[in-house]
Image (spheres, rainbow, N blue to C red):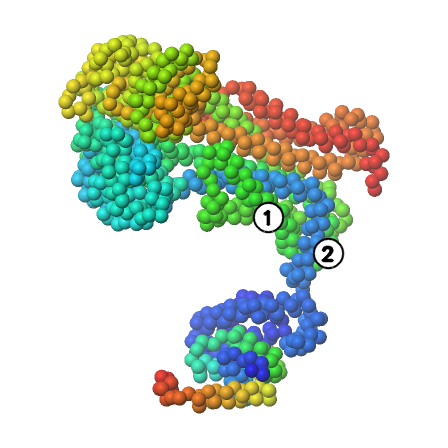
């Protein structure tokens, strides 16, 4: 013995591993051989290396040859001895065997028991499957939506080095950020910071008319710089990345556009015409770029050089006409903060006017010491930044809200599952006891019971995935989602969902299984266990459920109240009874407007007709474009939105001038250098009566000034979320009219739409009529909020429904267990009413506790949220009262199904059962 | 082929069993093979080959010869059977015939 202790021994765990998977009749010779070889190795290469080799050797023993034999010795000991085909089994096998808990016989038993149990308790199983699958469906939708948002723009190579520039100005009223840049900025950046790898301007906007061999298409043409292809790694299918946009007349078109416009032909070297009327220009196709993915901020059908843009020559040295976004690519070793610091002198050098202006206003530098600065935002964050993404972004808070809701619903379903499993576990206590008495180990029982719950989870999950697949079109239609099933098949998303599934099985199945495996066999078989019930855990889980659902309900109600409030706020113009018709690129808007005026001149149902460059709200063409203008007035820089209108604009929209007058056909000069401004513009200029004043246009080299002929109240031109910004309205006979507004009499709303459609066919046969009512357009401004509120309402109703489902099942079970008690109470003379009260009491108590927790929490959360809005509603106490009352009533109604039934049972029946 | 299939490694193991004559068991076979072929030989592979050979009837075995370094465990000693010897002989015959049929055998041999 002594000698053995001294000589080195191989790692014991490796031997145990071997014992576990090697057939026992081979163990002696194999371990013997291994040990002998180990001894030899120790002499040859030393103990350390020998141990390594030993472990390697043991691991090599884990192969099907041995494993198969191991399993078969465990399962079929007797059959193997007599088997004539196998010589192996003539080796003696006289050892005791413990039951291998994954052996086919045991598995068959588990499955049989599981199915019997499920069958016996169909109701609970159904509740579990329904609850879980609904929760999974909600989860998949919400996670998918959030996943798409979170992975926005992350497909570019070096996407951590791509940034968008924005202006920051610490205005004394409110710090402002804006992503719109002026044309000379990008060249100046490139000249002053030669270390930048690439700088590209991107001028997007409305769709342009594209003509290919006599065919016309409406396409989104992006006007940009050569560096576009250097910054973004949209793959170029044909053409050379370096030279594709080198010439001013080069165009790179998207794959889809190549297919639609050229079919099977090779478009490289072919020409196309972009633009309408006088702005038409010919381009030569030099490349095909693959389509931008759905989760790209930058979308395009074609790329051309920005120098071709309409206002380029006019504005190329104008630092105050902000029209486009600028993207830069930093060199590898420079981080955001460093470069922003380097940009400080840039702002001093080029934006002296803005700085002086801000100082005059009394602006103070922010904590980074900037009054006005050019800063940069990471491309991957641009999508979440509404200020600089031009209103198109999605605030990250929404994404987190969605994920939070998904998590809540999943948790509620899990709680149902746990509660039901624990409650059910008492009916199965005997089985556990018997199994334990027959030698089942704790972990064997755990695996068995947990496996059963995993089975239910799996069914729920599969049903959930199936439902998702079926409901996807409906979901997309209702929530304007662009979700596709194959987006779900991305490895990242599959990983997330599998993770969710595993966590759910562990949380929902693991805890009850652990509880059950812990049962004491002796007590269970004596029948003692039913006395102590884990009421505390079950009750706290029910409370948690109701906290979450009433929280969701309160928040949803308050959020939709706020939304409604925002929507019904006055927009500054009368949006009812106005039809807005996008003209389209195929026809000349001004001519169509003229023809329409003639055609409808004598129609009594038409009150006014006008044209403009910007639609109000969002119409069916889904286009929004914005142009701004900068003026200098008494040394002050005044910037405002620029809006082209036609005669009768104010009349059509029922905007009453505060001072001055509307444009009038009687004044021939109205179409030249005459403007109408909004009240906030006047305030910005610091004039109480600006009518007749002259505004200097920085951009204009001829330096003629525009005269103000009228002031109108502020109205919302782009979105209601923004505060009303200053607007300059002007009239021009040369610039294109893009939208036609028609005010009709209230008596003939729907009839007029049809009539207009007829007339439209005559005046603009080439263009499709896609007119909409202006109030619908304005509603579309709230699409995001609208969708969010719809998702929230749906989610909170599902949450409440699931909670009730759980409560229903728990009530059913508890009352089942109390059948005898109820019988005795009745025999002793309790009335039906008093029994119902007794039974319901305990549940109502739980809901009340939940409300006490949830309502203050909801109040606090919603107050914080509402504070983000400049104008917001005050939270009404009735919301909470209503939700509370509803919760109690719903819970009562759910429970009373069972209580009434139980109370009505004849005690003879319930007491006779044993 | 009329007889049971014999893989390359199995053939080597069978030959080694014949070479070791009575002293053939896992460790010695592995050591012998390692020394002669200069490949890495795993015990598990040798054992599986031995068991397969036994199932095919090319070797037979018995337990015996426990030593201290084996922790008192017995070893399984393998002996080649007549069938095994005959099979090896047949295989050698086939190979010899094939070698004899090569037109320029020195061209191949010189590569070694």
Please indicate whether residue A280 sits to the left or right of residue B23 in the image. left
Q: Which residue is mark 2?
A: A437
The residue depicted at 59 percent of the width and 41 percent of the height is A132
Could you say where residue A383 lies in the image, as x and y percent from the top left?
37, 36
For mark 2, give the secondary structure.
helix
Could you say where residue A626 lies in the image, as x and y percent from the top left?
31, 27
The residue depicted at 25 percent of the width and 20 percent of the height is A733
Instruction: Report if residue A174 is visible in the image.
Output: no
Parent chain of label 2: A
* Disc assigned to residue A150: none
For mark 1, give the secondary structure.
helix
Q: Which residue is mark 1?
A: A458
The residue depicted at 63 percent of the width and 73 percent of the height is A25
Confirm whether circles 1 and 2 share one chain. Answer: yes
Foreground pick, A892 / B63: A892
The residue depicted at 70 percent of the width and 56 percent of the height is A109
Local crowd at mark 2 within 10 Å, few (<14), some, or many (≥20)?
Answer: few
Could you say where residue A816 lies in the image, as x and y percent from the top left?
74, 37
Q: Nearer the viewer, mark 1 or mark 2?
A: 1
| The N terminus of chain A sits in image quarter | bottom right
Quadrant hosting residue A172: top left
């Amino acid at each position: 013995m002594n000698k053995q202790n001294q000589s080195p021994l191989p790692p014991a765990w490796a031997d145990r591993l071997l014992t576990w998977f090697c057939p026992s009749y081979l163990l002696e010779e194999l371990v013997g051989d291994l040990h002998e070889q180990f001894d030899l190795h120790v002499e040859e290469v030393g103990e350390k290396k020998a141990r390594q080799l030993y472990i390697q050797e043991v691991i090599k023993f884990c192969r099907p040859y041995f494993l198969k034999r191991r399993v078969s010795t465990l399962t079929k000991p007797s059959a193997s001895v007599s088997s004539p085909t196998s010589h192996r089994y003539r080796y003696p096998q006289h050892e005791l065997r413990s039951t291998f808990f994954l052996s086919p016989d045991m598995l068959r038993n588990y499955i049989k028991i599981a199915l019997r149990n499920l069958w016996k308790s169909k109701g609970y199983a159904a509740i579990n499957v329904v609850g879980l699958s609904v929760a999974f469906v909600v989860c998949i939708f919400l996670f998918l939506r959030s996943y798409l948002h979170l992975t926005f723009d992350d497909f570019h190579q070096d996407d951590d080095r791509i940034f968008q520039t924005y202006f920051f100005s610490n205005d004394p009223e409110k710090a402002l950020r804006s992503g719109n840049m002026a044309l000379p900025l990008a060249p100046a950046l490139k000249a002053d910071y030669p270390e930048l790898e690439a700088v590209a301007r991107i001028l997007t906007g409305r769709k342009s008319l594209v003509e290919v061999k006599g065919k016309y298409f409406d396409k989104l043409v992006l006007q940009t710089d050569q560096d576009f292809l250097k910054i973004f790694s949209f793959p170029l299918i044909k053409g050379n990345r370096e030279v594709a946009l080198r010439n001013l007349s080069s165009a790179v078109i998207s794959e889809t556009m190549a297919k639609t416009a050229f079919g099977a032909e090779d478009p490289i070297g072919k020409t196309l015409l972009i633009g309408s009327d006088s702005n038409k220009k010919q381009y030569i196709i030099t490349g095909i770029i693959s389509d931008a993915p759905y989760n790209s901020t930058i979308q395009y059908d074609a790329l051309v050089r920005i120098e071709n843009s309409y206002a380029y020559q006019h504005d190329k040295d104008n630092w105050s006409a902000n029209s486009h976004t600028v993207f830069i690519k930093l060199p590898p070793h420079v981080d955001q903060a460093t470069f922003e610091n380097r940009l400080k002198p840039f702002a001093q050098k080029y934006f002296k006017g803005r700085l002086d202006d801000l100082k005059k206003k009394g602006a103070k530098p922010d904590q980074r010491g900037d009054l006005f600065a050019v800063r940069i935002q990471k491309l991957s964050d641009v999508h979440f930044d509404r200020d600089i993404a031009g209103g198109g972004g999605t605030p990250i808070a929404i994404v987190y809200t969605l994920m939070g809701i998904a998590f809540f619903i999943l948790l509620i379903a899990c709680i149902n599952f746990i509660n039901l499993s624990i409650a059910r576990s008492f009916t199965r206590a005997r089985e556990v006891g018997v199994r334990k008495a027959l030698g089942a180990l704790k972990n064997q029982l755990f695996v068995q019971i947990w496996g059963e719950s995993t089975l239910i989870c799996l069914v729920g999950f599969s049903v959930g995935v199936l439902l998702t697949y079926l409901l996807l079109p409906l979901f997309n239609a209702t929530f304007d989602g662009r979700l596709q099933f194959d987006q779900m098949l991305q490895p990242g998303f599959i990983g997330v969902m599998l993770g969710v599934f595993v966590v759910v099985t562990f949380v929902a199945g693991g805890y009850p299984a652990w509880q059950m495996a812990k049962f004491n066999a002796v007590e269970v078989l004596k029948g003692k266990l039913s006395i102590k019930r884990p009421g505390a855990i079950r009750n706290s889980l029910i409370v948690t459920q109701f906290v979450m659902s009433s929280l969701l309900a309160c928040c949803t109600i308050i959020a939709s109240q706020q939304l409604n409030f925002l929507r019904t706020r006055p927009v500054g113009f009368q949006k009812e009874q106005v039809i807005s018709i996008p003209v389209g690129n195929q026809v000349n808007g001004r001519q169509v407007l003229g023809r329409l005026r003639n055609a409808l001149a004598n129609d009594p149902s038409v009150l006014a007709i006008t044209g403009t460059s910007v639609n109000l709200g969002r119409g069916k063409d889904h286009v929004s474009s914005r142009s701004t203008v900068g003026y200098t007035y008494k040394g002050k820089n005044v910037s405002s939105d620029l809006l082209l209108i036609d005669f009768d604009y104010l009349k059509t929209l029922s905007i009453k001038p505060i001072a001055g007058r509307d444009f009038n056909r009687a004044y021939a000069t109205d179409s030249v250098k005459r403007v109408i401004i909004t009240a906030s513009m006047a305030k910005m200029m610091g004039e109480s009566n600006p009518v007749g004043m002259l505004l200097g246009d920085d951009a204009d080299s001829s330096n003629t000034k525009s005269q103000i002929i009228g002031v109108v109240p502020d109205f919302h031109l782009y979105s209601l979320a923004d505060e009303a910004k200053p607007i300059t309205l002007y009239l021009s006979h040369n610039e294109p009219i893009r939208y036609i507004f028609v005010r009709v009499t209230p008596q003939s709303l729907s009839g007029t739409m049809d009539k207009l459609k007829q007339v439209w066919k005559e005046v603009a046969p080439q263009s499709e009529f896609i007119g909409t009512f202006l109030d619908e357009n304005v509603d579309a401004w709230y699409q995001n909020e609208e969708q969010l509120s719809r998702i929230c309402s749906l989610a909170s109703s599902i949450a409440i429904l699931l909670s009730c489902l759980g409560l229903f099942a728990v009530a059913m079970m508890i009352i089942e267990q109390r059948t005898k008690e109820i019988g005795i109470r009745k025999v002793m003379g309790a009335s039906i009413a008093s029994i119902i009260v007794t039974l319901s009491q305990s549940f109502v108590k739980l809901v009340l506790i939940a409300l006490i927790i949830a309502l203050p929490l909801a109040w606090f959360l919603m107050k914080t949220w509402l504070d983000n809005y400049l104008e917001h509603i005050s939270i009404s106490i009735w919301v909470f009262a209503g939700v509370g009352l509803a919760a109690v009533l719903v819970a009562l109604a759910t429970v009373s199904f069972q209580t009434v039934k139980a109370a009505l049972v004849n005690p003879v029946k319930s007491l006779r059962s044993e | 082929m009329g007889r049971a299939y014999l893989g390359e490694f199995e053939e080597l193991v069978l030959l080694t069993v014949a070479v070791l004559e009575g002293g053939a068991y896992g460790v010695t076979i592995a050591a012998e093979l390692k020394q002669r072929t200069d490949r890495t030989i795993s015990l598990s592979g040798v054992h599986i080959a031995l068991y397969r050979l036994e199932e095919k009837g090319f070797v037979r075995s018995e337990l015996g010869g426990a030593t201290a370094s084996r922790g008192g465990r017995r070893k399984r000693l393998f002996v080649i059977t007549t069938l095994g010897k005959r099979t090896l002989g047949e295989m050698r015959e086939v190979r010899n015939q094939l070698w004899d049929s090569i037109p320029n055998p020195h061209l191949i041999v010189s590569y070694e």
